[in-house]
Amino acid sequence: MGFITTSFPQFPQFTVFISLFTNIKTETSATIKSELIGANKDYDFCFLNTNHIISLEQLYASIHRSILNQSNELMKAKTLNTEIIFNLSSVNNIMDALKRFGVDESCPNLIVIKVLKTDEIESDTLKELNQHLLKLLDVDESHNIELNDEILFSKLASVQKTKKLYKLNDATYSGNESELQAELTRLIIGATLLRGF
Amino acid sequence: MTDRLVKEIEGHLPHIPLEIVSQGAEALVFQTSTHPYIDDPYLKNQKKYIVKFRPSKPYRHPIIDASINKTRTIGEAKFMTKLNKLGINSPSIISVDYSKAIIWMEFLGSELTNGDISSFKNWLWYLERNESEAKCVDEQVEQVCKKVGELIGKLHMNDMIHGDLTSSNIILQDFEPALIDFGLSSYSGLAEDKAVDLYVLERAILSTHSVFSDTYNGWLLEGYGSIHKQYSKQGGTKKYAETIKKLEDVRLRGRKRSMLG
Amino acid sequence: MTVDLDQYVKPGKGHYIALGLEGSANKLGVGVIKHNIGPLSQTNRAEVLSNIRDTYVTPPGEGFLPRDTARHHRNWVVRIIKKALIEANIKGTDIDCICFTQGPGMGAPLQSVVIAARTLAQLWNNIPLVGVNHCIGHIEMGREITGADNPVVLYVSGGNTQVIAYSKQRYRIFGETLDIAIGNCLDRFARTLKIPNEPAPGYNIEQMAKKGKHLINLPYTVKGMDMSMSGILGYIDQLANDMFGKQPKKVIDEVSGEPITPEDLCFSLQEILFSMLVEITERALAHVNSNQVLIVGGVGSNERLQEMMKLMIQDRKNGQIYATDERFCIDNGIMIAHAGLLSYRTGQTNLINDTVCTQRFRTDEVFIKWRDD
């Protein structure tokens, strides 16, 4: 199975399910978009394209912050799924965030996230969830690979696009290629945390 | 640190083991072995993190209190991010809870032989208390002082004002200084503001490291000047001259100030 | 303490008596203090034999000018000294040293008092003179009265705003005002509102502030361990002029919708200024790893400031606050006598041609020979 899970020390009551799917057809992406607008229960996930996701740390920072906002009752978006997308963005505009990070027909890869209540997870819950997604996204298991930093940075994301999106072209870098993922992750997290100020 | 404050932070950060590092005037600084969301972050130190919490101050009027804590938390996060972008040594930010005035950040520095954290202050104190006088003004101290000066020079070249420069707000990571504590930081291109920033540090060195303060302050200004020379294309030389001139004014004002009983 | 304080005791005597004269601002103070031989301690306290003060009070809306204040001091100094000697039940010849404020302060009033000191010294068979730094007087008296052994000192008065801590035989200034002093700021605002100067403008502001309830928004200007107040004063002065000037403008509290009163202005000014004072004090505490605070100086008698400081110190481990009442907080002669006598007991006296007063005299210029901790 290609999914991973994580949970945050502050919020043990939640478990985060994350699964990566590649080779998604354009039609499928279009369907997801319309079903999301229609709030179809089957599509109650956070769907992300992979163009601007360069590390798990970037992703986790956003999920953590979204759960924190939820528990502080300070969410800007209506749902936690959208809140996660919004918190990936350095621009204070939810529609813009959805456009940049949400489902995008031109990107064949999707990261799918769901925040579950830990005590409601039974032995098969996660597996079933992933099966459901395989069907929903119409891909076979070979296109459901485990998400990690290597794949994100060197295969799925565009460093150039990401730098541009987060306005990080003029930042000071060490020039050391092996440090770039680390440096960008730090800068991106900083940029998202300061959104709106 | 009192129980009231411990309870407050524990309520905000359940399940996070916290160990107090310092109780400053505006914030409590803790270290923790737990990262809020990932085990192997892209940070220099993956075993320790800093949690900075600005508790509400019961002595302040609630309106003043809320406004100060909010402004400072946002201001500090913003300042750190900007420094990060400019490549000026300072901790990197991990997470912020604006509503509770909590900032998680990278842990910088190491433990000195006596167990104290390697701030510029603690290191100089350590040398003063445990080493010979010659050691207190040796080449390594000179190098570090100059690097601190350079760091502040870079800050000022970017029109950023620290606002609370003391030897305890400079952390040494492998003898490379980094700036911390930006609750009072601001942005200004005025020579006056930069001069006050330098004057605050000069006075802090004088009162905290009085024995060799003249030597230290001399080295700091040398480093400060050398960075401005490097930036001569961006007007560094002129900016330096203006700031130093203002610094002399500010010093004079300081001495004149004590007028009435 | 290992400093020998009894090298200069008069043969056959077991104690010292010092006369102190203070007149650096609008208070003329004369005090007589007695130290028994041996180091001062809980069981060997300094003894206040007398502490007399007379204040030069000006009409509402007016500050005290150097020339008029000096005249007041000249007119009263003989009477006050006599009163102090009678109350202490001593004669001039019982005195070991005559201590006077050498600075900082207003030139003319300082000079009028030092002339009295010099005259008496010569009149009474050349009693040694001891010049005292006014701020050191406040600090040492505060320590003696409260028993605070090594506190961070907040010194707040009409002319000074300093956060001081002792290190290596000097009282070092960690934080201070970058422009005007706190007392000066309050006095000037009292003048704007035409609040009486009797008994003291700051006291009257304090009483009005107790009746204020709406907080107006004022700038908060802490800079490291320093602070600045002229901007705040300018802002609130302007507001007061708008509200109570020739064309009065009503200002409404945003929360309650009620009009802002002069009491609200006093309240707001105190809240913001004292918050800054407490913060810079706490900054110094953290910086030098101390947990004791001593408040000295005229503004130190303000109850709200003391209350706020207490709330701050309660959140620090083993935190303790020390403050003195108005007898010792407000400028007085006894503190000059006390600090001067400590100086005398370590052999520091002034030859008569070395008794010139100085308006500028920083706290950290004084070598504290009587401490070596």
Image: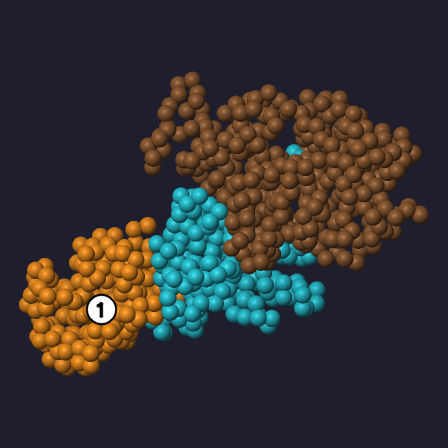
Chain colours: A orange, B cyan, C brown
Nearer to us in this view, B43 or B140: B43
Instruction: Tell me the quadrant of the picture where the N terminus of chain C can be found.
Output: bottom right
Check disc 1 and give the amino acid type. Answer: Val
C243 relative to C115 in the view: left or right: left
B210 relative to A117 in the view: left or right: right
Chain of the residue displaying label 1: A
User: Local crowd at mark 1 within 10 Å, few (<14), some, or many (≥20)?
Assistant: some
Q: Position of residue B259 (x, y in %)?
A: 65, 35
Q: Position of residue B62 (x, y in %)?
A: 41, 45
Tell me the residue at 20%/63% (across/down).
Answer: A81
Tell me the residue at 37%/66% (across/down).
Answer: B14
Q: Residue furthest right?
A: C12
Q: Quadrant of residue C128?
A: top right
Nearer to us in this view, B64 or C200: C200
* Count of numbered marks: 1
Q: Is residue C111 above or below residue C247?
A: below
Instruction: Tell me the quadrant of the picture where the C terminus of chain C can be found.
Output: bottom right
Q: Position of residue C144 (x, y in %)?
A: 71, 47
Tell me the residue at 16%/67% (across/down).
Answer: A45
Find disc 1 in the rendering and name its residue: A115
Q: Residue furthest top?
A: C246
Q: Is residue B56 above or below residue B174?
A: above
**Secondary structure found at label 1:** strand
Q: Position of residue A4 (x, y in %)?
A: 24, 77
Q: Is residue C110 above or below residue B16?
A: above
